[in-house]
Image (spheres, grey):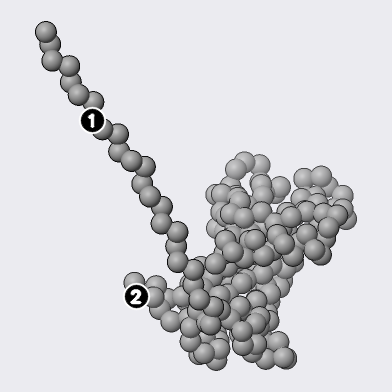
Amino acid sequence: MTRELWFKITTARRELDPEGRFSHPVPQADNLPDPDATEVQSHEFKKPDFQWIHDDDSEADERYIQKSFAIECKRLGAPTKSRWRLNEQYVVGGMNRFRDPRWKYGRGMAEGAMIGFIQNMEFEAISSAIDSDSKRIGFDRISRDPRGWQERSVSRLGNSFRREFPITPFRLFHLWLDIRDVPLKAKRSVHPAPKCAPKRRRTPR
């Protein structure tokens, strides 16, 4: 799903910004080097799903001029057969990475984004589960767009919170894509490379 989203983002970027003024998103890349650190930090090796890396022309210090708008993607819905709790992971393995100093997603920015792929369950049930897990680790309830839930479309939500690194407070936008009626594409089979026939040993004469 994230891979398909990448192609959609690329198409939209070319249509909305044909001159490339706002650079382009980068998938699965390391966080930018931390200009406040004198040596490599562990959070610099963390990889948001997408980053929109750009130069901030208003920044006077060259060390701080490059910024990254981070986007993290997660599935939403009922637990999987392996008991992976999707809604809980949206919070602890998604939202919290924008607040946790060990991850520092969106460092140096005042905003970031989460994209949720709704696979099953009703909107309200997912929202209730997200609010419960958010409260458990100290997040305020996610506010819903006045237009409400958008079936077979994109629902918009948001929340703000404080964190131990700049910029704080931080605003996180949430885009929930309803894909419950979208048929999943079958994975392409990858055929293993043919095994080479074993070499025949030469019989000593």
Q: Quadrant of the C terminus?
A: top left
In the drawing, does residue 65 fall left or right of residue 160? Answer: right
Q: Which mark is residue 10?
A: none
Residue in view at x 67 percent, y 91 percent = 148
Q: Which residue is mark 2?
A: 81
**Quarter assignment of residue 96:** bottom right
Placement of 37 over or under 69, stated as above or below: above
Residue 62 seen in the current view: yes
Foreground mark, 1 or 2? Answer: 1
The percent coordinates of residue 5 (x first, y second) are 62, 65
From the image, which quarter does the N terminus lie in? bottom right
User: Residue at the top extreme?
Assistant: 205
Query: Label 1, label 2: how many angstroms apart (C-alpha)?
Result: 41 Å
- Disc 2 residue type? Lys
Residue 53 image offset from top left, x and y in percent:
73, 54
Depth check, front residue: 163 or 73: 73
Residue toward you, 187 or 51: 187
Q: Give the secondary structure at mark 1.
A: loop
Amino acid type at mark 1: Pro
- How many neighbours does mark 2 have within 10 angstroms: few (below 14), some (14-19), or many (20 or more)? few
Q: Which residue is mark 1?
A: 198
Q: Earlier in the sequence, mark 1 or mark 2?
A: 2
